[in-house]
Structures are given as structure tokens and as C-alpha cells.
Amino acid sequence: MINFKTGGPFVTRFAPSPTGALHLGNVRTAILNQLLARQSGGKFLLRLEDTDQERSTFAAEAAILWSLSWLGLAPDEPVRHQSLRLGLYKKAVDRLMAEDRAYPCFCSEAELEQDRLEAAAKNLPPRYSGRCSRMSDEERAERLRRGDAHAIRFRLPEKAEVAFTDLIKGQVSIPAGAFGDFVLLRSNGWPSYNLAVVVDDADMGVNLVLRGEDHLTNTARQILLYDALGLTAPAFAHHGLLVDPEGKKL
């Protein structure tokens, strides 16, 4: 484990989704991020990841902002809203598409569910089969011409394995095959979590991402995106989760 006191200045961020009240684990993460920024002479930033149109609410956003204010966790810059940054995500995807690092996926929900069922039957984590990555250029162009609904997926490098040094856990290695080609833009044009996080953290100058260990696989996806977009990845640190005696989040 690296001593955080020797680094910095750290630009950290807390990035909750306004889909409900803060959990205790969220609050601890916010406190740790602010303390690291203050200790190192850096900045503590706040971003609301409100791209889940169905679940995000103004009431939840207000509750989060009130709670953070009550805790004294004021950010050093104005709050960012991902819903106001859609142009940045589209620009990043256009670049990946132009370089054949991403492709349109026309799969129906029924086809994707079949992929999930087949993976579950083999006791494997759910992952995309890569069906549309093998589509011919002619078929892809025709379906785009017809205006068929589609998402945009990231094309994983062949035999990719993502290795990085976690400031808490040490050396971590995750095979990209564990998650497959992942969605960048949904069919409605809104970004996936992993795309938006990478674009925003780079744009905001975040150089240390401190969050729960349940994000380790997301970190592997995000490092691949940083590399594909020619961006410098931040340092990562993943702490344990706050759970009850049954292992459930508090």
C-alpha cells in the first residue's frame, strides 16, 4: 500500500447518482476524498451522475446536496451534472468509431438475454457474445442507413488483460475477457457509466479516484478507454465496503 501522505496535490471527486438517499458507505467515500484533497493541497470536486433517466430525480439530488452540506463536504468548484455534458461523450465515441475501436450493436433485448442465460448456465459472469462485432461492413452500413436502433460498444483489444497498481490493494490484474465488449452509448444516445466517468474525470482533471472495491472491474474497463482515447488515467484506490454481519451494504 502506498502512503497517501507522500503524494499530491490530489484532485479527487465524489460522484453519486441521484437515484436515492446517500448510504453510509457513500458518505465515508466522500469524507475520504475530501480529506485527501485537503491534506495534499488539492481539490475536492462533486459530480452528479444523472444519466439514469428513469431513476434519477430532483428530490434525490436535493437530498444528496443537503446531506453533503450538513456534513460540511462542500466542493471546491461548481457541481457538474452529466446530463448537461452529452456532447462531450458523443465526441469521444465519434473518435473511437472513426478508429474502429467501437462499433454499432443492433442486438435486441431478447438476444442479449439469451447471452446472459447461456453464460449463467456455464457459471460464467454475463458478457456480450460479440455478435455485432463480426458483422460485415456492408450489412452494418445497410442497417445504419435504414435507421435501425442500436447502441455503440467498445471493441476490446485481442487477448487484453488489464493490470494496474491500486494504491490500497497493490498490483491488480483483470482479464478483459471477464466482461466482453461493453456499451458506450445506449440506443437513446445517453452514455454508459464507464464512458461518462472516463470523459468527465479527464475533463475535470481528476488524478485520484478513490472508491469502493465493487468498482474494480469497472476500473479495468475505464483503463482500456483511457488508453483508446489517448488520455492519462488517474491513480486508483479501492477501499473495502461497509457491510452488516450478513455482508449486505449498510
Image (tube, rainbow, N blue to C red):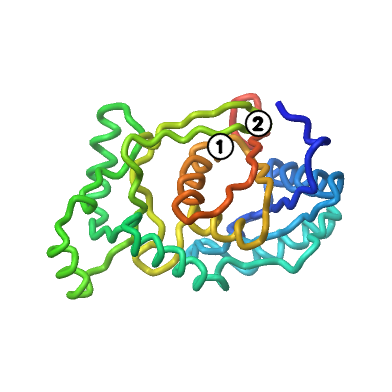
Q: Which badge, 1 or 2, is on the more N-terminal residue?
A: 1
Given the image, on which type of amino acid does mark 1 rest? Answer: Asp
In the rendered image, the vertical position of residue 22 relative to residue 179, given as above or below? below
Residue 168: name its quadrant.
Answer: top right
Q: Around disc 1, counting alpha carbons within 10 Å, would you say few (fewer than 14), some (14 to 19), or many (20 or more)?
A: few
- Tell me the element at label 1: helix
In the rendered image, the vertical position of residue 231 relative to residue 149, given as above or below? above
Q: Along the horizontal axis of the image, is 48 left or right of 151?
A: right
Q: CA distance from mark 1 to mark 2?
A: 8 Å
Residue 161, horizontal then vertical, whole percent:
42, 33
**Quadrant placement of the C terminus:** top right
- Which residue is denoted by mark 2 in the rendering? 240
Residue 122, horizontal then vertical, whole percent:
26, 27
- Which residue is denoted by mark 1 in the rendering? 214
Residue visible at 59% across and 28% down?
247
Residue visible at 54% across and 37% down?
216
